Amino acid sequence: MSKNWPLWEVFVRSKNGLEHRHFGSLHAADAEMALENARDVYTRRNEGVSIWVVESKHIRASNPENNGELFEPAQDKVYRHPTFYNIPDEIKHM
Amino acid sequence: MSENQIKNIEAEFDARIARDEKIEPKDWMPEKYRQTHIRQISQHAHSEIVGMLPEGNWITRAPSLRRKVALLAKVQDEAGHGLYLYSACETLGISRDELYEQLHTGKAKYSSIFNYPTITWADIGAIGWLVDGAAIINQVPLCNTSYGPYARAMIRVCKEESFHQRQGYEIMMTLAEGTKEQKTMAQDALNRWWWPSLMMFGPTDAESVHTAQSMKWKLKRKTNDELRQQFVDQTVPQAELIGLTVPDPDLKWNDERQSYDFGAIDWDEFWQVVKGHGPMNKQRINARVSAWENGEWVRDAAMAYAKKQEESRTKQAM
Amino acid sequence: MMKEELYEYILGVADNSLILGQRLGELCGHGPSLETDIACTNISLDLFGQTRSYFQYAAKLIGNDATEDTVAFLRTEREYRNVLLVEQPNTDFAYTIARQFLFDVFHFLFLDQLKNSNDLNLSAIANKAIKEVSYHQRFSTDWIKRLGDGTPESAQRIQAAIDDLWRYTDELFHTSNIDDKIIEAGIGVNLSELKDPYYSRVIQVLEESKLVTPESKWFQKGGKAGVHTEHMGYILSDMQYMQRTFPNMTW
């Protein structure tokens, strides 16, 4: 067993209506402590109304070496954007 | 990879930074980039937590409740800033415990200013005003540095630190406007903290070994001497405004440069303190080491408890 | 009811927050982890915030240029009304947590009643403070469990701290003549009613934490009457240092 407190990622909702956003990380022995620590570390200035914590090791991240195949194919799919389509000028909003 | 391939990748890497693209943790990076960042970010983190000690020294003695809560909140912020920076450093593949180890064994450095003692209440004002003032000048450009996690940590740090310098200046101003004893106390603190504050910007450009590389990686935007000049130009009028005298007989306004000329810094003292011979080096490290060692059984207990809870949850699930 | 009596009553409430806040403030920068350090400082800040609200009100009551600071800093040791529990030192993290827990459980029950005070100032302070203290209680309870059911060493340390501090718990429920008058006026909290819920809550947490409830029935008292332990003088020498060395100045 590692004796060191594991690393957790902290996500905070700043106010209702907004999504949880990654705020940073911290160390804690368990989820309860991670939540308490997150409250004390990341919401001291009234920054949040809801907190998620997840142990960092549970996050699977894409590999930047694969960015070519993962993300570049989306670059030329212009037909997914409204500006691809022509409509008469008379129609101002669509 | 062949040597040529590596060179190409490195050139592409540098070009990305030049285009103001950010580098993120899982991106490929030159080993030297990683090491330099670990060194600088951890030094920065160590400075925050060692910096808690000289100011923490006055929490129980703060002269009013208002000053007490402000100081507590400020020192607590420094713990938070240390935490953000250690976290940024950990994304480079080194653990906080390893970083502590480097601090505790003297392998890692921290800002030498914290090796000076806080002997009067006015020192708390001087630290907030001068030391945080100098730190902000050093830090603001880092909000735009190339390594994403470091830049994000610095944005948070700079935002939170904006009250620190005001807190210090307000203390100094109150003392300067106070009784004769208070004014003497304020002037004495300025006398003792002025030169060490100028040293916070590091050796002169001629002596500084890392500058060119650091500029390329946006770990630095201006040279040590440029930043020091900025600090002097900004701080001297602030001292004058509250009737305090900067302890430098050579200080004078240079109309041509539109800047202050100032006297020579005692670099011998600077290097002595860096090498561990400052008034408080030993006490600062001892305080950090004993907090860490005295906390070991606490950290172990929390882990043991977490493991037991996990096991009992697993058992219940089965 | 006399203003002086209400003033005295407020001191009895606020001095607990002041002295415990001061004790926690000593730890800032020396905690077992950065995260825990930040958490303990938060509790300290909450307690000083409460202290200021109480003292600002108390200063208004007595007038005569009194301020939150003259009330906080310019009394003699015999004039401080805090319970002995909160002045006990940070011997180790177990003592810090045990002291916090034994006080938090009381503090929460107390504020829960003070919310109903006829005195609108006090009920407003209580309404705000109880949210803070609810969190303190959660924090210290969680740590009692971690230390009690952690390693053999932590169990031994937290048990020793509980055993040692137990003798200061009974004083939490003592009342003075002034208390009785203030309670009668519907302003103060009837402490004797808090005693049963206090011990049942504390004993429940100790059991969940695999700790033994001390059997000792011999308790210490005196803080509320201004007769403190030897620690108090040193707390005040630190706390009052500036005000005593440089009297009558603005900071």
Image (cartoon, coloured by chain):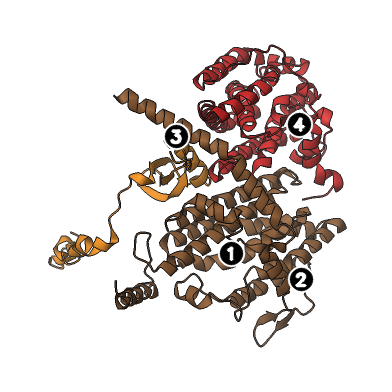
Q: Secondary structure at mark 2?
A: loop
Q: Specify the quadrant that holds the N terminus of chain C.
A: top right
- Is residue C247 among what the camera can see? no
Estimate the spatial distance between the alpha carbons at disc 2 and disc 1, rounded to whole Å. 20 Å
* Front position among marks 1 and 3: 3
Residue B158 position (above or below residue B3): above
Q: Position of residue B35 (x, y in %)?
A: 46, 65
* Front position among marks 2 and 3: 3
Circle 1 residues within 10 Å: few <14, some 14–19, many ≥20: some
| Residue hosting label 3 | A32
Q: Secondary structure at mark 4?
A: helix
Query: In the depicted view, which residue is nearer to us: C137 or C4?
Result: C137
Estimate the spatial distance between the alpha carbons at disc 4 and disc 2, rounded to whole Å. 45 Å
Q: Secondary structure at mark 3?
A: helix
| Residue hosting label 4 | C61
**Is B72 on the left-hand or right-hand side of A20?**
right
Query: Which residue type does callout 2 highlight?
Result: Val
* Front position among marks 4 and 2: 2
| Residue hosting label 1 | B136
Q: Chain of mark 4?
A: C
| Residue hosting label 2 | B246
Q: Position of residue B149 (x, y in %)?
A: 43, 59
Q: Chain of mark 3?
A: A
Query: Which residue type does callout 3 highlight?
Result: Glu
User: Do dots 2 and 3 share one subunit?
Assistant: no
Circle 3 residues within 10 Å: few <14, some 14–19, many ≥20: some
